[in-house]
Image (cartoon, coloured by chain):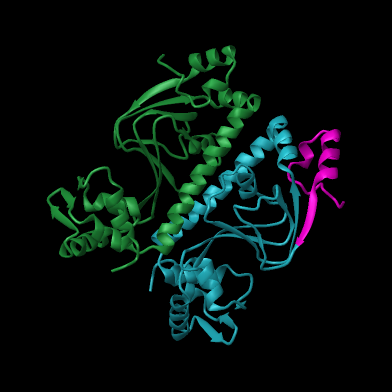
Chain colours: A green, B cyan
Amino acid sequence: MENTTEFPFYSFLSPQDKKIVTENFRTEQIPAGSVIFDSTSCKGVLLVLSGIIRVYILSESGREITLYRLFENDLCTLSVSCIMGKMPMQAMIKADTDCSIATLSNDIFSGLHQKYPGIQQLLFETMNTRLADVMWVVEQVAFRGMDQRIGEFLLSRPSTIIYLTHEEIAAELGTAREVVSRMLKYFEKNGYVELSRGKMKIIDPDGLRTIISGGS
Amino acid sequence: MENTTEFPFYSFLSPQDKKIVTENFRTEQIPAGSVIFDSTSCKGVLLVLSGIIRVYILSESGREITLYRLFENDLCTLSVSCIMGKMPMQAMIKADTDCSIATLSNDIFSGLHQKYPGIQQLLFETMNTRLADVMWVVEQVAFRGMDQRIGEFLLSRPSTIIYLTHEEIAAELGTAREVVSRMLKYFEKNGYVELSRGKMKIIDPDGLRTIISGGS
């Protein structure tokens, strides 16, 4: 078993309870693109050790929209919901990159959760952050135009050269590929981006910022 | 002090703790339309004794979208977030009808929360329900057309005669009044509804159901 000090609640635990966690958690390597679990296959309380996990909704017609992402040391609250049989049906959990995850059985987690106020607090705060994340998505989808959302998404990327397909951007934002393609062509016509096969480059970030702030 | 057995966690408590709750909660009458609290004025953990509370997001331009409603005996998880200084900034909480609410101070609630696993469970489940509610809103806004959403909203009302302004329906669904007016006129032209000053009447619910299911 590898290092468990990464469990976000590990520091709260007594030496005995630390030992229980160390002896009972299970690690797993998940390749990029795999569905980690859905509402019918709960594995226990899940923690991201490394990699990035995407939580999204899938529509009946196969469209996707990202709700939030989990990073290193993040606790997956949906795994807790899943164990309790209360998982929102629409949520999908998939590895964005190769991931290493740790799971702890419900029995052990529940016992610790009851015993340590710090874990109760952590779980509440984590749920609260997720709720804020999903509210942010509502705000974006309900009140912002697709031009603003695509512009903001492009500027939020770590580099000005973006290796994403139009399909992937559409799945991020909950729209159709054609809508993304049309908007990117408009951005290109205005000299904000340069499109080429399999990538795009931001050449006028200020132009995109004008779009985002609602100007034209 | 009036009856507190309505607190959803009251049944878990020892006789002493019941006494503490009874002696310390505070009831308040809130007239319809009042803002109950925002992120700068936390009053304690809030429970709805009677009436309906609406939780919504307000856009910069003054548009609204409903996230969920709280009914009798519902615990307001945003009040818990607020106390912890972790309230999502965008959320607004307003009385839909005249309400009676009970509040319990953070100190007392925290003590009980730490002591009773049943309360921890209740809080987690309540947060989880809210998260599912808000995910449902994302799904609606991202994947369903305004014709479907307005049709569904009309059919979800308790009566076929609906006393709501176009403005109020727009605030429910996160759109502009003009969009609602245009869609209602289209529904009227198709013989699904009858519009008159200050009210509308559903005359062909099956027509609306066809719209909702994505047919034309």
Position of residue B155 in the picture relative to residue B211 (left or right): right
Position of residue B48 in the picture relative to residue B152 (left or right): right
- Judged from this view, the residue extending furthest toward the front is A206
Give B114 or A77, whichever is nearer the viewer.
Answer: B114
Residue A104 to residue A61: above or below: above
* Magenta segment boundaries in residue numbering: B1-29
Position of residue B69 in the picture relative to residue A42 (left or right): right
Residue B27 on the magenta span: yes
Which quadrant does the C terminus of chain B fall into?
A: bottom left
Q: Is residue A63 visible?
A: no
Give A154 or B163, whichever is nearer the viewer.
Answer: A154
Total marks in image: 0
- Name the image quarter holding residue A6: top left
Q: Residue at x 30, y 37 (%)?
A: A33
- Indicate the position of residue A138 as horizontal and vertical percent values: 45, 56
Q: Residue at x 39, y 60 (%)?
A: B143
- Name the image quarter holding residue B183: bottom left
- Indicate the position of residue B123 as horizontal and vertical percent values: 64, 41
Position of residue A145 in the picture relative to residue A17 (left or right): left
Residue B64 to residue B166: above or below: above
Q: Is residue B56 visible?
A: yes
Give A197 or B160, whichever is nearer the viewer.
Answer: A197
Give A149 or B182, whichever is nearer the viewer.
Answer: A149
- Judged from this view, the residue extending furthest toward the left is A196
- Indicate the position of residue A106 as horizontal and vertical percent values: 55, 27
Residue A207 on the magenta span: no
Q: Which residue is drawn at 63% across and 70% down?
A: B158
- Indicate the position of residue A149 as horizontal and vertical percent values: 33, 58
Residue A118 to residue B159: above or below: above
